[in-house]
Amino acid sequence: MTAMIDENVKAMYMGYFSAFDAMPAKDPELQRKINDWKNRVETFAATISNILDFYPKYMESGLNEEYTTLVSQLYMQDNASATHATVDTDSAAVETKTPIISVRNFLEQYRTAYDEIRKANYRKRTEKAYENIFAVADRTDNMIEAQTILEQERLLWKIISEDCRDVFEPILEATDPLYEPIYLATKFNYELYLHCECDEEMTYRGQRAPRQINLLIQPPLTRILFATTIVLLAMKAEEYRYKFWTLYQKGAMDNARKNAATALVIRDKCRRMLQLLKESFDLTFDDLVADKHLRHLMLAPFTPLVTLGRYRKTLPPAQLEFYSEIINEQILPDLTDEEFLLHETRAILYKNYESPDYDEKIKRIAKENSMNLTYYKYEDALDKQSKSDFFDLKEQKNKKTPNLDKF
């Protein structure tokens, strides 16, 4: 089974492929090398799960150097007419001049990738980085001097660094700042590229990044674990206690006792979590409720309404009053088992409202409120393009097999 390739990653390397497609090789051996390179690029792309990893790993793999060599060979074949042989009839000596690639033609190998970048219509820094490369042809006609400029001014590196900024900034802008683990990790990666000056530095920083990110996100992850676990246990304790009373009133004493025992076990687990929270972090449940980064997660978050979760469907904020009453009045106090089971809960327990029409409505509102951000504009454009390609493909199929759908 062929591994699935991320569409964004595919869009990146297809720019390189189209350069070869637009200029087929005349030499079968050269075409074989190009096809082999394409296959290895696709195999490499299938290992990339994060679009931000593509360029750094692509450069490290050596595939970029091979790409430059193959493109140069293609230009040499097109300049073959410039190659000529002069024969000295007296000595039968043959002089062959090697075709020369102009700086401008050499830099044109980046044109197709540049055109693909422009289609995104938001990667402005990357566009400028490519334009700076093309501008080298206006500064010199000497290939060695051109290569020196590219190296000294790190122009090829800036394609990577600027594109990473173009990719990270919209993601960071669209990421929910209240969900700290993802937001902090994204911000860390974004700032990492801001301070890198070369591929070697990026490799070094990239190798250290996983541990640094782990240290950065562990505190908020720990608080999230405590907050969500405590409210879940509080809700379960109330749920089993309610079952106990329902069964008790019906006279089903055996099942009533089982549910009473379960409610008491859950109460003890919740109490131990609260004690650990206080002893290890000097925090109370009220401290967790006061944390804006945790409140929405304690309200039983369901499926995010938009990518990256800036909008979520949750329970009403009044649900926090229910949790506070259960924890502060029933679980933490030293109540006997009987007192706990007989305690009356005043606050309301809310449940998820299931309605396809309502869910569709709030998803639409969330999307409309997100469309001012670059990430969602680009996501919407990709979605429309994907649908357009699907219907174009279906139309072509219908023309070839007009009775297939009817059949």
Image (cartoon, rainbow, N blue to C red):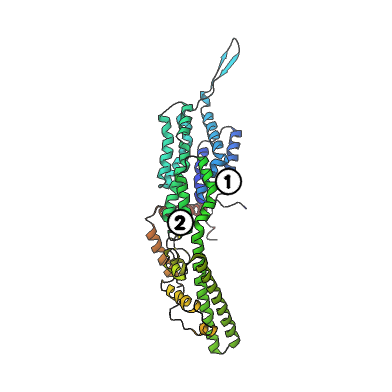
**Residue for badge 2:** 183
CA distance separating discs 2 and 1: 28 Å
- Checking the image for residue 118, the label placed there is none
Up the image or down, 211 lies above or below 358; here it is above
Residue 386 place in picture, x, y as percent: 47, 53
Q: Quadrant of residue 163?
A: top left
* Tag 1 secondary structure: helix
Q: Residue furthest right?
A: 1
Inspect this view and state whether residue 381 appears: no
Please say if the residues under marks 2 and 1 sit with CB atoms less than 8 Å apart: no
Residues packed near mark 1 inside 10 Å, few (<14), some (14 to 19) or many (20 plus): some
Inspect this view and state whether residue 213 appears: yes
Task: Judge depth for marks 2 and 1 and give the one in front.
Answer: 2
Question: Which residue occupies 54% across, 48% down?
Answer: 208
The one nearer the camera, 382 or 199, is: 199
Residues packed near mark 2 inside 10 Å, few (<14), some (14 to 19) or many (20 plus): some
The one nearer the camera, 86 or 406, is: 86
Residue 398 place in picture, x, y as percent: 51, 54
Question: Number of marks in the image?
Answer: 2
The amino acid type, in three-letter code, at marker 1 is: Phe
- Checking the image for residue 44, the label placed there is 1
Left/right placement of residue 118 relative to residue 240 reads left
Q: Give the mark, 2 or 1, whose residue is nearer the N terminus.
A: 1
Question: Which residue occupies 50% across, 77% down?
Answer: 331
